[in-house]
Amino acid sequence: MELTYTKVGDYLVPDLMMDGEDELEELPLGKYGMMREDFLKEHHSGTYTSMLLTGRLTPHLREIDRQAQEQVDSIVRDLMKRQGVNEELKSSDQMAWVQAVNSFTHQAEELVLAEIVYK
């Protein structure tokens, strides 16, 4: 493997990547991944440091973010279906539809934060 460099101003900076790092790593973390990172830093600093040093932190945060978002989306869909919040309501009373969806989203996030992000 050949070491390559990128010129930044007047300096050549080595192009270094950790094992397993790819283009997806450059995408920013989502809201739940960032919340999980803050939680680990504040309440489990040893685990946070260990995961950071071994290269397991970013994949873990991405997985938590993915799981949490999928769970929130699923719960909101189920609540909308059960409560009859549909496109018909959206076209007839847009404010009621928005209020209902926001309420469902907050309920879903409370569950997801407790069960996935802050566990």
Image: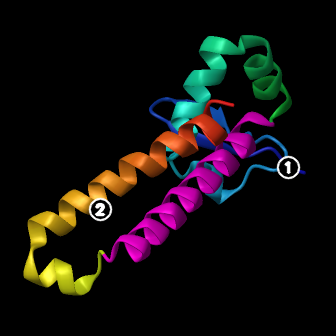
The span picked out in magenta is 56-84
**In this picture, is 111 found above or below 53?**
below
Q: Residue at x 54, y 43 (%)?
A: 111
Q: Where is residue 19 in the image (x, y as percent from the top left)?
A: 85, 45
Most foreground residue, 9 or 18? 18
Q: Would residue 58 appear left or right of 33 to someone viewing this image?
A: right
Q: Are marks 1 and 2 in contact (CB under 8 Å)?
A: no
Identify the coloring: rainbow
Residue 35 is inside the magenta segment: no
User: Is the stretch drawn in magenta largely helix, strand or loop?
Assistant: helix
Most foreground residue, 6 or 83? 83
Residue 74 is inside the magenta segment: yes
Q: Would residue 76 appear left or right of 86 to someone viewing this image?
A: right
Residue position marked by numbered label 1 in the rendering: 2
**Residue 101: which numbered mark, if any?**
2
Residue 15 visible (yes or no): no
Q: Which of marks 1 and 2 is nearer the N terminus?
A: 1
